[in-house]
Amino acid sequence: MRILVVGGSGLIGTRVVDVLRGRGHAVTSVARTARPGVDHLLDLESAAIDDLRPLLAGHDGVVLATRADEQRVLPRPAYPALRRELVEPVVRLFTAARHEGLTRGVVMGSYYTHFDRLHPQWRLTAHHAYVRCRREQAGEGRAAAGPGLPVAVLELPFVFGRAGDRLPNWAGPLDRWARSRAPLVVPVGGTATASVDSVADITADALEQARGGDVPVADENLSWAEMMTRIAGAVGRPRRVGRLPAAAVRAPLRCGGLLHALAGREAGINPAHLADLLLAELFLTPTTGRSLDPALRDTFAEPVPSAGGTPAWPPPRPARHCAVSSGSRRCP
């Protein structure tokens, strides 16, 4: 097959390109910035359908491996900006892919859409503009693709690993926290986790099988305490991880949400409702059964450069929340 990978210079896109080529497929890599291995430069957010069709021509499938920062703070309401970033480019991409006769596609999504389906009483799309846009991205992207172009949406949790110099953008803050002398204290909930290798393998499988549908991806389900314990071990500073009571989690996040509202700002994941997610067990089943340890070692074997996104925990102090979040980059 011939596959176009949009976002081919990022952590996931780079690994997807490697896996597809290793399975004998021809791959064209497209990215916003020039890097070794990128075949074409493209800003997907500004590209029109007519710009996309020549790139897609002659390919069998397309992978959208770009990511978005759900904690980036935007002018309130955040929804229009997030929709321009997450939904509208995907509709144009799959409209162009349908016109060019492609027969399969994969989109890197978020596991929040899985929990939105599973727990509608959580009202995730009402509370969080990012989740609303992720749900619209999947639905409207598939509608644009049509019945002849099945689109698999990989619902991704925290993804660990390294591809060259590419790392998870939330890895820097967690790396510095684990290497510091600060106590490690986390909420009582937990999260699914996956390695970038698993994500790339499942992407290739979905393309080879022309499989559509929602595909939750997880290697292991970990409590926050288990995850930070393993990160601390990976950086060479193993120590006890404490647990915070729910009230100590909710108070600073609600304060952060209030400060955003007073400043006319809003994050894709609203901090006023983030504690409900942090205190839940955001676990996915089934898991692959693959150990996360190799990906953890790859991610944290050496200090992570300072550039990076804002992790879900620990939250910045309320007085700093807007400044820190507005400077963050991309998170899973």
Image (tube, rainbow, N blue to C red):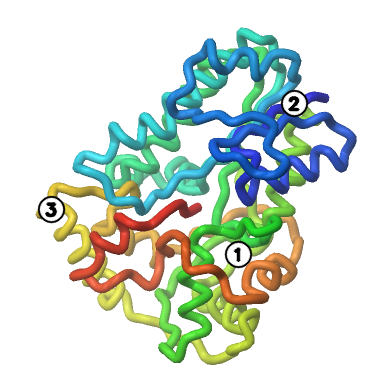
Left or right placement of residue 22 versus residue 33 in this view: right
Residue 154 percent across, percent down from the top left? 61, 41
Residue on which the image places disc 1? 221
Q: Quadrant of the N terminus?
A: top right
Say the numbered circle drawn on residue 97: none
Q: Going by the picture, which residue comes out furthest to the top?
A: 99
Mark 3 is surrounded, within 10 Å at the Cα level, by few (under 14), some (14 to 19) or many (20 or more) other residues, namely few
Q: Earlier in the sequence, mark 1 or mark 2?
A: 2
Residue 321: quadrant of the picture: bottom left
Residue 139 percent across, percent down from the top left? 48, 26
**Does any portion of residue 27 appear in the rendered image?**
yes
Residue on which the image places disc 2? 210
Mark 2 is surrounded, within 10 Å at the Cα level, by few (under 14), some (14 to 19) or many (20 or more) other residues, namely some
Q: Earlier in the sequence, mark 3 or mark 1?
A: 1
Residue on which the image places disc 3? 263
Name the secondary structure under disc 3.
loop
**Does any portion of residue 153 appear in the rendered image?**
no
Between circles 1 and 2, the one closer to the viewer is 2
Which residue does the image show at 63% across and 87% down from the upper left?
Answer: 236
Which residue does the image show at 51% across and 14% down from the upper left?
Answer: 49
Name the secondary structure under disc 2.
loop
Name the secondary structure under disc 1.
strand
Amino acid at dot 3: Ala
